């Protein structure tokens, strides 16, 4: 069926036709037109498939091209300088890079355990009739656009944190050496911590749904054997399900991480846009994507624009690597399931 | 036997199972909280004038007509560009080149583009279109949305066509149908519900996209359908209005957020119903 050789159906049909009557000539014409259409369609679809690669190539080339002025001006120091001064045209990317990584880490620290536990609930504990509704609800959470999380975070979540959660954190951790620095300072409401929490809510559905899918793929006989030995539900999850699905779970986590790293609007609303690295998680900061979103349209001068595009390039490289690892892990999993 | 070991195992199980319940409650409560606030804030500002009046200057009443229309127009163009391309690419991957190297590579890259940061897409289109043309434009906004549509459609089209049983294709080939016609008349028809779902999901995805529009379509305070000029869009207006100090603008931002969310939820529910029908039939 999938042979790609030249001996198509049309060729076979053409062979039996002598060129004698008008009807037969007509038949040849129709068949030839069909064959042309066939070839054209094949090439059209092939070109469309190649477009996907062209888009990726275009993104890489345009980002590299756009960031050349900045990279030429600052060299490698762009990666570790903290100063970000549009007036003197001195730019360094470490503050946004730091913000991106720290907010994503906070998000993963919360979303991974919660997501795994929800997946465990959905596959082991939840009554059958409830599985679908809860699964759909969690996926709806993934469908809400990020700007909605942003506006909600700014008007509802950040004030709540400022009034109720952050003073509490400051008071509780104030005496403990390392934690007192992490949770120091006035409760602004907006800041790195809040951005991390919003990201956690946003990536939770991705981690949950992939974990649930791979948990469901565990052969029942493995779980039943463990239950038969007298394992508790937790022991089955911990010693049978999790080891069996490790690759897939890590793939899902990496996918969530890729989302968290690149998330723009929700973070832009609540991070506070301060180009500095602060020891305290409660202080305002910035991320790569928030910096671009906030400053790009107002950037005057080629060097400023170029520095922002260079930030975009860094972001793309980081997320590309993370997402590529995620996909490779999930591919490996599929290969194993298929085998 | 060891009673305390048994008790501690039971205790540990009890704790972790309680955690699983708590985690699910935690995850679901965010959905409830966000939707509740959104409905509360959004509905109080919802009125007919939202759909009939332009975005106001600070301090006066107005509506969201120009951003709603701008979003609709750019979404439609993005779908018109992205869907045929995506379906074609998906067709190649599932029909002609199912075992090709090209397909493997495209699938891998496509999956990465599917979750690549959308702001990078905005930068790409800015470099390719805005910087070349010298001004922001609705076309650039539509193209950047199309770049986001393509991977979604490619993915669903390929998945759905792969699910079509080969016996259908063989039957079509055996009655002498050329391959292209077999794909168009038989495979597409069998996979239609799933492919439409893919397009709906893509529309849902781009209807809330803000980041790629910020510096492609920019924004426009006035009524304009000129796609060669900046075009207003709902997400960008929400972004601008929500961060403004004016109470009226913030109110409109909430209303806009409600409209987008309802549209996205509606699209996802329709998509879900379509796939559910396919499964039962």
Image: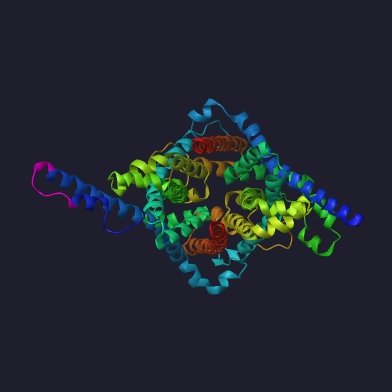
Q: Quadrant of residue A85?
A: bottom right
Could you say which is closer to the camera, residue A18 or residue B244?
A: A18
**Magenta stretch secondary structure, dominant:** loop
- Residue B276 against residue A50 in the figure, above or below: above
**Does residue B80 show up?**
no
Question: In the current view of this chain or complex, which residue is farthest to the left?
Answer: A20
**As rendered, which of A177 and A18 lies closer to the eye?**
A18
Q: Nearer the viewer, residue B3 or A143?
A: B3
- Colour scheme of the rendered structure: rainbow
Residues B148 and A235: in front is: A235
Question: What x and y, as percent, mark residue B26?
Answer: 72, 44
Which residue is outermost to the top? B48
Which image quarter: residue A132? Answer: top right
Question: What's the residue at 86%, 60% (across, down)?
Answer: A175
Query: Residue B215 appears at what percent x and percent y?
Result: 48, 51
Residue A255, percent from left and from top: 59, 56
């Amino acid at each position: 069926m999938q042979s790609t050789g030249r001996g198509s159906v049309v060729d076979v049909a053409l062979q039996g036709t002598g060129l004698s009557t008008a009807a037969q000539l007509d038949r040849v014409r129709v068949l030839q037109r069909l064959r042309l259409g066939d070839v054209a369609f094949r090439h059209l679809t092939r070109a469309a498939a190649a477009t996907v690669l062209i888009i990726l190539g275009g993104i890489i080339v345009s980002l590299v091209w756009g960031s050349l002025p900045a990279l030429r001006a600052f060299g490698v120091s762009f990666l570790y300088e903290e100063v970000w001064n549009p007036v003197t045209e001195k730019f360094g990317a470490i503050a946004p890079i730091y913000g991106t990584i720290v907010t994503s880490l906070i998000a993963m620290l919360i979303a991974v355990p919660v997501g795994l536990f929800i997946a465990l609930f959905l596959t082991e504990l939840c009554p059958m009739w409830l599985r679908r509704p809860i699964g759909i609800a969690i996926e709806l959470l993934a469908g809400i656009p990020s700007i909605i999380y942003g506006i909600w975070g700014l008007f509802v979540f950040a004030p709540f944190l400022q009034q109720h959660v952050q003073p509490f954190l400051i008071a509780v951790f104030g005496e403990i050496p390392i934690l007192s620095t992490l949770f120091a300072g006035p409760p602004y409401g907006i800041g790195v911590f809040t951005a991390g929490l919003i990201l956690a809510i946003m990536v939770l559905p991705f981690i949950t749904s992939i974990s649930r899918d791979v948990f469901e793929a565990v052969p029942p006989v493995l779980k039943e054997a463990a239950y038969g030995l007298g394992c508790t539900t937790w022991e089955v999850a911990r010693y049978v399900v999790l080891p069996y699905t490790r690759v897939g779970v890590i793939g899902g986590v990496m996918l969530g991480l890729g989302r968290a790293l690149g998330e723009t609007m929700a973070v832009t609303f609540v991070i506070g846009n301060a180009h500095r690295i602060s020891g305290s998680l409660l202080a305002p900061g910035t991320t790569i994507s928030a910096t671009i979103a906030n400053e790009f349209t107002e950037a005057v001068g080629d060097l400023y624009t170029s520095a922002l595009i260079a930030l975009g390039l860094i972001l793309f490289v980081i997320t590309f690597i993370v997402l590529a690892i995620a996909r490779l892990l999930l591919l490996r999993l599929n290969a194993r399931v298929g085998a | 036997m060891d009673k305390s070991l048994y008790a501690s195992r039971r205790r540990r199980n009890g704790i972790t199972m309680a955690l699983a319940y708590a985690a699910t409650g935690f995850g679901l409560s965010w959905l409830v909280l966000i939707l509740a606030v959104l409905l509360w804030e959004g509905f109080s500002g919802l009125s007919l004038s939202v759909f009939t009046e332009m975005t106001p200057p600070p301090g006066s009443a107005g509506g969201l007509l120009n951003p709603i229309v701008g979003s609709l127009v750019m979404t439609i163009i993005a779908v018109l560009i992205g869907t045929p391309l995506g379906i074609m690419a998906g067709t190649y991957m599932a029909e002609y080149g199912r075992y090709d190297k090209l397909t493997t590579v495209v699938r891998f890259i496509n999956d990465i583009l599917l979750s690549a940061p959308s702001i990078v897409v905005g930068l790409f289109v800015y470099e390719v279109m805005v910087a070349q043309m010298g001004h922001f434009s609705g076309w650039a906004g539509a193209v950047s949305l199309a770049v986001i549509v393509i991977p979604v459609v490619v993915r669903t089209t390929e998945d759905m066509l792969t699910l079509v049983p080969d016996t259908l294709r063989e039957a079509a080939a055996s009655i002498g149908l050329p391959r292209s016609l077999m794909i168009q008349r038989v495979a597409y028809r069998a996979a239609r519900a799933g492919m439409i779902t893919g397009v709906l999901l893509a529309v849902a995805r781009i209807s809330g996209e803000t980041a790629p529009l910020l510096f492609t379509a920019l924004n426009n305070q006035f009524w304009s359908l000129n796609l060669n000029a900046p075009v207003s869009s709902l997400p960008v207006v929400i972004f601008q209005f929500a961060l403004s100090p004016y109470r009226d603008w913030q109110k409109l931002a909430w209303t806009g957020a409600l409209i987008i969310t309802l549209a996205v939820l509606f699209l996802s529910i329709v998509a879900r119903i379509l796939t559910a029908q396919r499964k039962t039939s």
